[in-house]
Image (spheres, coloured by chain):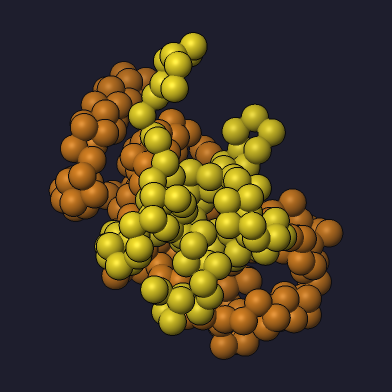
Amino acid sequence: MLEALLGSEKKEKILLFLFTHGEAYPREVARTFQFHLNTVQNQLLKLEQDGVVYSRRRGKVRLFGLSPRYAFKKELETLLEKALGFMPQEEVARFYRPRLRPRRTGKPL
Amino acid sequence: MNFKRFPLPDLAAHLSDYLRGQGIEVVLSGGACVTIYSQNKYLSYDLDFVLTSYVARRKLRETMRTIGFSEDGRHFRHPDTPFIIEFLSPPLSVGQEPVKNITEIIKRDKILKLLSPTDCIKDRLAAFYHWNDRQSLEQAILVSLSQRVDLREIRRWSLREGMAEKLAIFRESLKKRRAAHRLHR
């Protein structure tokens, strides 16, 4: 969808994942798409270096998210939202529609 | 070059001037600007230089190595100074807006380009607004107490960032600090 612009299909998937999940850690992204962990880490570090994403430590993991201070954040989100609209619904449901609302402890699925 | 006796503004000016001579334009941002504008009431050890146009990492590495700085992950270090240098990718922006007016100061006959006091406050407030970072709020207040700043412009920018409620916290905190400041004089 946006790989022509972003130069990489993996980068597109990583950005879409962060956009739809809010925050994610590299292993979670790698596991979801069956990418090498190093590939995901390198892409995220490069995006962080360029100010597109931020990272912060939470316990033992490093979480990444789209940086609210990135000058083109709104425009990037518009592009990502549009890309989701062009994607097959099964793919969106499988990778990009996480449950974000809370679930009470002990509540059955 | 011996950087041992270089305080932060002098080192920043020296590096900025040197890089300009190598065809690399940078603008100082972040906590280092707070150190300069607050007359060391806040001391940063990070020199965050924003590149005004794209520069290959290899070129930066070689340029910095020539004056004794070695790459350490994303940063550059020199054995003679505790300050850590980082280069941030363009564009130079505060929140969603580009920075239009850049301030210049001269240290040891070298020109240092840096965020204006008003943009420095916006830069710190962006961290408070988006990360809820209270240290950044404190830094914004320190600069506001030490420099002439355009509070109307800060209000306009904050509202455009959608941060009316947090702007109110900044203004209220600043008001209290100004009152305390007057009492102690």
Q: Which chain is yellow?
A: A
**Residue at x 28%, y 22% (from the top left corner):** B176
Location of residue B40 in the rendering, given as x and y in whole percent from the top left corner: 54, 43
Relative to the observer, which residue lies in front, B104 or B63? Answer: B63
Location of residue A33 in the rendering, given as x and y in whole percent from the top left corner: 58, 57
Quadrant of the drawing holding the N terminus of chain B: bottom right
Location of residue B120 in the rendering, given as x and y in whole percent from the top left corner: 38, 53
Q: Is residue B79 above or below residue B132?
A: below
Q: Give the left or right position of residue B176, taking residue B39 as reference.
A: left
Q: Quadrant of residue A76?
A: bottom left
Q: Which chain is orange?
A: B
Q: How many marks?
A: 0
**Residue at x 48%, y 43% (from the top left corner):** A23
Q: Is residue A109 above or below residue A56?
A: above
Q: Is residue B124 above or below residue A1?
A: above
Residue A67 visible here: no
Q: In the current view of this chain or complex, which residue is farthest to the right? A: B79
Residue A32 visible here: yes
